[in-house]
C-alpha cells in the first residue's frame, strides 16, 4: 500500500479519521500531532495566496493568446 496522508482528530479517547478510509488490519501508521497554532498560520498563508491569485487573475487582467507566449 502506498503512503497516504489522512486528516484525523483525537476525541479524548481515540484517534478518529475525518474522512472514511479503508485500512487493512494491522496497518502500520505514523501519527503526527499538529500544533493548533499551525492552523492559524496555515489559514494566513492560504489567505495571502488567495489574495495574490485574485490580483493575478482578476477581471481586469487581459486575455493572452498562445501566440503571445514565447521562450526567453
Image: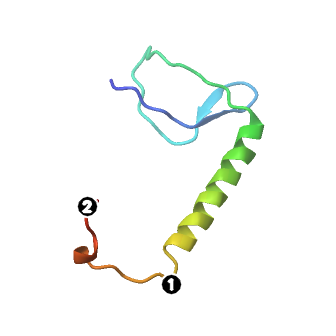
Determine which residue is flagged by label 1: 59
Left-right relation of 10 to 54: right
Left-right relation of 30 to 23: right
Q: Quadrant of residue 63?
A: bottom left
For the N terminus, the quadrant is top left
Label 2 packing within 10 angstroms: few (<14), some (14-19), many (20+): few
Label 1 packing within 10 angstroms: few (<14), some (14-19), many (20+): few
Task: Specify the farthest residue to the front.
Answer: 72
Instruction: Indicate whether 17 appears above or below 72.
Output: above
Query: How far apart, in angstroms, are the residues tagged by discs 2 and 1?
Result: 26 Å
Mark 1, secondary structure of its residue: loop
Sequence order check: which comes first, mark 2 or mark 1? 1
Image x and y of residue 10, in percent: 69, 30
Instruction: Indicate whether 6 appears above or below 26.
Output: below
* Res 24 label: none
What residue do we see at 56% from left, 71% from top?
Answer: 54
What residue do we see at 44% from left, 14% from top?
Answer: 26
For the C terminus, the quadrant is bottom left
The front one of 57 and 3 is 57
The front one of 59 and 39 is 59
Instruction: Indicate whether 29 appears above or below 67.
Output: above
In this rendering, which labeled residue sits more in front, label 2 or label 1? 2
The front one of 38 and 9 is 38
Task: Specify the farthest residue to the left.
Answer: 67
Left-right relation of 8 to 70: right
What residue do we see at 59% from left, 58% from top?
Answer: 49
Image x and y of residue 53, in percent: 53, 66
Image x and y of residue 8, in percent: 60, 35
Determine which residue is flagged by label 2: 71
Mark 2, secondary structure of its residue: loop
Amino acid at each position: 500500500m502506498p503512503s497516504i496522508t489522512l486528516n484525523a482528530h483525537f476525541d479524548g479517547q481515540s484517534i478518529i479519521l475525518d474522512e472514511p478510509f479503508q485500512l487493512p488490519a494491522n496497518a502500520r501508521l505514523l501519527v503526527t500531532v499538529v500544533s493548533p497554532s499551525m492552523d492559524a498560520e496555515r489559514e494566513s498563508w492560504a489567505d495571502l495566496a488567495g489574495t495574490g491569485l485574485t490580483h493575478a487573475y482578476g477581471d481586469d487582467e487581459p486575455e493572452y493568446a498562445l501566440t503571445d507566449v514565447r521562450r526567453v
